[in-house]
Amino acid sequence: MKNISDKIFSAKIWWLYLLLILLAINFLGSSFHTRFDLTKEKRYTLSPATIHLIKNLDDEVTIDIFLKGNFPAGFRKLANSTDEFLRLLKDYNSSKVNYRFISPKEVMPGTNVSYGDSLVGLGATPINLTVQLKEGQQQNFVFPVALIHYRGKQQLVNLYSGSNRIISQNEINGAEALLEYQFLSALDKLRKNDKTVVAYAQGNGEPNDYRTYDLQQVLTKEYKLFVFDLSKQPVIPDEIKALIIVKPSLQFSEDEKLKLDQYVMRGGKLLCYIDNLYAESDSLAFKSQTIAFDRNLNLTDLFFHYGARINTDLVMDLQCEAIPFVVGGAANNPQQEFLHWNYYPLFDPANNNPITKNIGLVGGRFVNSIDTIDAAGIKKTILLASSDNSRTISTPALISLDENRNAPQDQKFNKSGIPVAVLLEGDFSSFYKNRISQQQNDSLNKFNTPFISKSGENKMIIVADGDMALNEALPQYGPLPMGWNKFTYLAYQQQSDDGKYFIPVANREFFENCLEYLVANPEIIATRNKNIVLRLLDSKKVKEKESQWQLINIVLPVLLVIILGLIYRQIRRKQYE
């Protein structure tokens, strides 16, 4: 009897020890939280910049995510990934970070306005999910966005930049990879009391009409925008962190070039969208052909010195947009059809840098090619390039609508990767070093900006197409998003399916990323480089070994439970014999 009572007492002590150990583990787990990210690409690891920002929040952050509802699998997956990411943020500062999922159909408290209507007013673009029912079609709008509230301010976060109703796995991976960047960038902007100052250049024929509407919307939303007349002002102020030059049509004087050069030497950033040739689609509205010729902007030698040259040619590409052509019918009732127009190329962004990572196709109009030049201390990164089926034509170039009467001669489109946009980074040398005149030098000293022969670490972006940053307009829609072809935009809006030629373009996103890369915190930009690898199963092997894996996943767990139960029973029997 004594042996039995001793064994019972020992068993109770053992259970008491186990209970104390469990309590200690729970206490340590609640006090000292940590996790181990075993994924190869560190999917669940935040960057040091994100951790520092979250830990140093001085006010509460509330995040509303509008992905609650009965959505297709792609949007549900995106919602789950967003939830996982926000849990990571909350783990680092649970008292300051709060988030919730809201349905866009819900009505805002104290109003009769739905969250969806409010989001449209803030600039969010919904995706229309049209479902066919017996009684007809039912529309369900998805808002793949989040809204961050901080210090009485709010910032919209795009969780998915596309417009497709069915998200592919690659698009989900791209959206998940950008989650950290999107939230970090938005929070950083909310924390800043002052917006970054940027300027839109004038004085050399740059457009300042409805074509710049979307550009102005982008700039005034995120930056403090000024219009700077390069022809009238004596010097570009250092307060302007980036100068944007879009589609100039008048020649730059040497004094104006000196202003640009010295602005770069003092650390100013240039974002240039340049058309080296005069080639406009408006000219084709009056006659079926036009001649493309050199604008003679007098910028070639300046850019050449910095490491890039915009050529006087046109890039033609089989990967391109479409415009309507008259293919038959009577004069008073012409028959039109959408045909590819090789002068409107669509560029696949390079996926090797934060600017173009995980963005869609970028559309151009009568684009020139760019050559990179050997310049000491300057690193060149190609941002946009043509497809594998492209070519260039030299000037003077005859552009004719009659080219589309016959199929293009594919054998002529034998070039690939023709650069059309380049990022230059490094220590720039002044174009006017050892050649500045005494008069120019005196002019600089007069405004307390002495001549500088070499810049520190700096960067600039040159794009060989001015229209890439402009927008068109339609009477029924007004100004369109940046880069959209008005003909395909109209067709895209009127069709329930995307159609063969109606491809959304990412010109606005490309412009935003370029400017942000030039002026934003490099640590924040670096988070765009996060990559999530899509590891697909071998469908052939899965089919061949389907039965084997079914047995492993269904039968094996049951057998393991039975075996462990028998082992435990034998141990208990021997213990109390």
Image: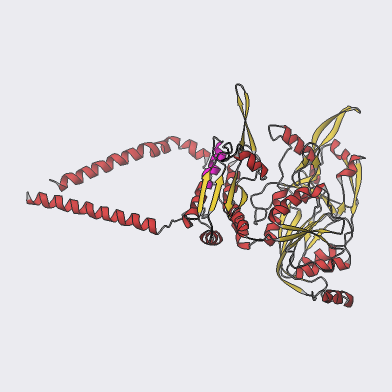
In-front residue for pair 539/432: 432
Q: Return the x and y of residue 395 as percentages of the image width and height.
A: 89, 52
Extreme-front residue of the structure: 110
* Residue 111 placement, left or right of 255: left
Verify whether residue 74 appears in magenta.
yes
What span is in magenta?
72-82
Verify whether residue 193 appears in magenta.
no
In-front residue for pair 153/548: 153
Q: Quadrant of residue 524?
A: bottom right
Extreme-top residue of the structure: 135
Q: Is residue 435 visible?
A: no
Quadrant of the image for the C terminus? Answer: top left
Magenta portion: prevailing SS class: helix
Q: Quadrant of residue 460?
A: bottom right
Query: Taking 334 as reference, is 13 above or below it?
Result: below
Residue at 76% across, 51% down? 215
Query: Taking 431 as reference, is 110 above or below it?
Result: above
